[in-house]
Amino acid sequence: METIRVLIAKPGLDGHDRGALVIAQALRDQGMEVIYTGLRQSPEQIVASAIQEDVDCIGLSCLSGAHNELFPEVVRLLQEQGADDMLVIGGGVIPAEDIPYLESQGIARVFTPGTPTKDIADFIRFALKERKGEQQVAPPKKIAHIGIAVKSIEEALPFYQQQLGLPLEGIETVESEQVRVAFLKAGETRLELLESLSPDGPIAKYIANKGEGIHHLALEVEDIEDRLKQLKENGVQLIHEQPKEGAHAAQIAFLHPKATGGVLLELCQYAQETEGD
Amino acid sequence: MSKEEEFQKLYEEWRRKTEELIAKFPERKEEFLTSSGIPVELLYLPDQLDQDYVERLGFPGQYPFTRGIHPTMYRARQWTMRQYAGFGSAEETNKRFHYLLQQGQTGLSVAFDLPTQIGYDSDDPMARGEVGKVGVAIDSLEDMETLLAGIPLDKVSTSMTINAPASILLAMYIAVAEKQGVPSQKLSGTIQNDILKEYIARGTYIFPPQPSMRLITDIFAYCAEHVPKWNTISISGYHIREAGATAVQELAFMMANAISYVEAALEAGLDIDQFAPRLAFFFNAHNHFFEEIAKFRAGRRIWAKLMKERFGAKKEKSWQLRFHTQTGGSTLTAQQPDNNIVRVTIQALSAVLGGTQSLHTNSRDEALALPTEESARIALRTQQIIAYESGVGDTVDPLGGSYYVEALTDKIEEEVYRYLEKIEQLGGAVKAIEQGYVQREIHKAAYEAQQRVESGEDIIVGLNKFQIDDEPQPEILRVDPKLGEKQKEKLNRLRANRNAAKVEQTLTRLREGARGTENLMPLILDAVRAYATIGEICNVLRQEFGEYQG
């Protein structure tokens, strides 16, 4: 991919550029080319520099309260000069109540103090791809299975088989995870009952902490190694950085619940199509 | 006489002088007691005084002033509670001043808007969106008269955060006092007037370093004669710290700048003991409690040694580092803003334990906007609680002798000297700034600090740990968006009504003065009295001196 070019600018008279400089450095560390305008730039000067430098994104920083007048003016001038494909983001001491107004004026996103610099870099990459109409990431194929932690497969199975009528596909032991699993087919997906083989196994611990219940969601993907690499590069917290052998001879890896909104997510890739095997 | 007896004698002498002082200026109470009724002594000392103690710490009010610049410190008088305030129009800010004075504040501190600080009139295109935003808009003497209406300038001391156009604002202050019938000899206050830190940290410069230094030494010389109680500069570590410097860098770079001002004044032919007692300092206070306390103590010792040993100042007053402290604006979080009250309390306490002469406590909502009246009051109350309820001011330098604090004080002193040597090698602060050395050091520290926060190595409560979802947004202060227009109208009326010929004449005189070497203060004062605007005066100087390109 081409290197993203960013102009970091300080519109207005405010001379506090610590934030602007830190972000400029952070974006450089993220592999972007960054130009910093220096202090006291008028919207006209900023737009002229942005066009001249042919940047992809303009980051505006203002701490003096002049943002409502100066930020939209930059967007207006970009439109006037036919350069409105540039992404404009803003930051600084900006009250939450001003953000909807700024966004309505064409500022793509406003980052307030305390935002991790990496989030800003991620946003720029994402938004630029989106603008170009590029597909961000291919969606997973489907939900491969839903993992349910149970104390005993034998005790749990009759409900799923007899009351719900789900066909049992088989029971197998996964030594590496210290579990025994039972797969029940439910339409195009499956339920996976997990029973711990030992009192210190991960499933036993899970039940001790949270009781029986949904343990994880597994998504089937095309190329698990590639996915993990991408996620890692994007700073997503992983439990497994390399795929490992799971049940059904699948390649599996878990993502950390911190990255997923509290859900333990498993990625899995099967050796062959799972439909109709 | 044995060494021991000699030290004992030094102490007895200090004790006697202090008692004389107390007889003249009594302490706040006859007797200071803890809540259990235990008497609190003025000063606590080691059982055995030795060479090391006498040289490194000494007694409060005595060289090298590690333990404070007054023998009685807050036992006699609390520090000045000086809240920085100003926004919108002169009328609004005047109202806030009266409110703060009524609430028990003891000094004023004026925040000016950015156009004023950079020498633009409110109708200048450069002022777009900025009028009245981070401070009050002052275009001419007329606005200054409104700002200070009903405030007795012989009784209140006023600090003005103004740097590049400091001489103009000081001239306006003097002119308002004249109208109130207060002679300039009676005025007390401080102008920040520290241009070097503008180039490295705050960005509100106008002119290049050389003419800026001349304006500063002109103020030193003028005030020594005409406004003797005025602090003619407040050498600021504050903004250096806010730009990302560490505590050591804050102290080191402010000291390096201070050395430059002293050298410039000496080169201008001023007598050290005449201007040095009017130099004041402005520190930041961040969260690392003991390091902050140690920083203040080390700062006093370094300054005393510099002035006495390096510059050969004779007067005790010249050796004393007197300082204002503001709690750290950049340490405040927009997340869970009420937590900022606690941060400010810790920081304010470090300033008091470090022996500050005056203090500004930040308001909880400053990571969001200018403080509301309620937030400003809580901030002031925070100081008042420390002053009147905590008892920390009942003994002088309560942490003196703490193994930890003394070791930190020594270490900070040592590291500051290392920076000062490096800056000397580069040719002094002005050269180091021109080469970008100081700026690079600060930016490096700022970036490293950000990385420590992002990696979670440094914890900031509510920001990278202990967050809450769905935070309610607090009420914030909003400046009238029409203010810019109103201020423009006011300015047009002024220009129509004043004596245009007189304005022209004073500006021409100023231009001639700028080309030569005479002191510019009297010329600026005449222009101000004729109601020349800040933009008009600065434009003359811009044309003569040029503008600094950052």
Image (cartoon, coloured by chain):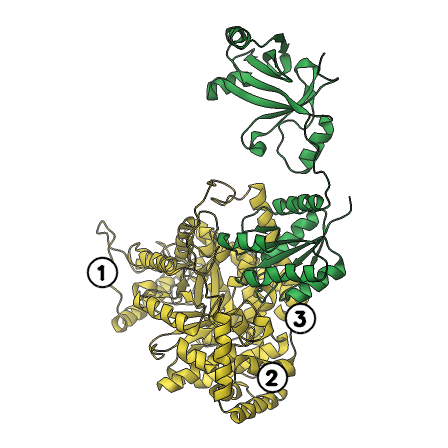
Q: Colour of chain A?
A: green
Report x, y in % for residue B183: 38, 86
Q: Is the same chain shared between marks 1 and 2? A: yes
Chain under callout 3: B
Task: Give the structural element (helix, strand or loop) at label 1.
Answer: loop
Q: Residue B471: x percent and y percent? A: 45, 44
Q: Give the residue type that dot 1 points to.
A: Glu
- Report the amino acid beneath label 2: Val
Identity, as a three-letter code, of the amino acid under mark 3: Gln
Image quadrant containing the C terminus of chain B: bottom right
Rendered image quadrant of residue B317: bottom left
| Residue B31 numbered mark, or none | 1
Distance CA(mark 3)–CA(mark 2): 18 Å
Q: Who is closer to the viewer here, B181 or B216?
A: B181
Which quadrant is home to the N terminus of chain B? bottom left
Foreground label between 1 and 2: 2
Gap in angstroms between the C-alphas marked 3 and 1: 58 Å
- For residue B549, the mark is 3
Residue B541, position as x, y percentages in the image:
60, 82
Mark 2 neighbour density, 10 Å: few (under 14) some (14–19) many (20 or more): some
* Residue closest to the eye, B285 or A232: A232
**Marks 1 and 2 in Cβ contact (< 8 Å):** no
The disc, 3 or 2, on the residue closer to the chain's N-terminal end is 2
- To which chain does the residue with label 1 belong? B
Which of the two discs, 3 and 1, sits closer to the camera? 3
Figure check: B14 above or below A233: below
User: What mark, if any, has residue B540 been given in the picture?
Assistant: 2
Q: Is residue A267 above or below residue B238?
A: above
Q: Is residue B139 visible?
A: no
In the figure, what tint was chain B given? yellow
Do discs 3 and 1 share a chain? yes
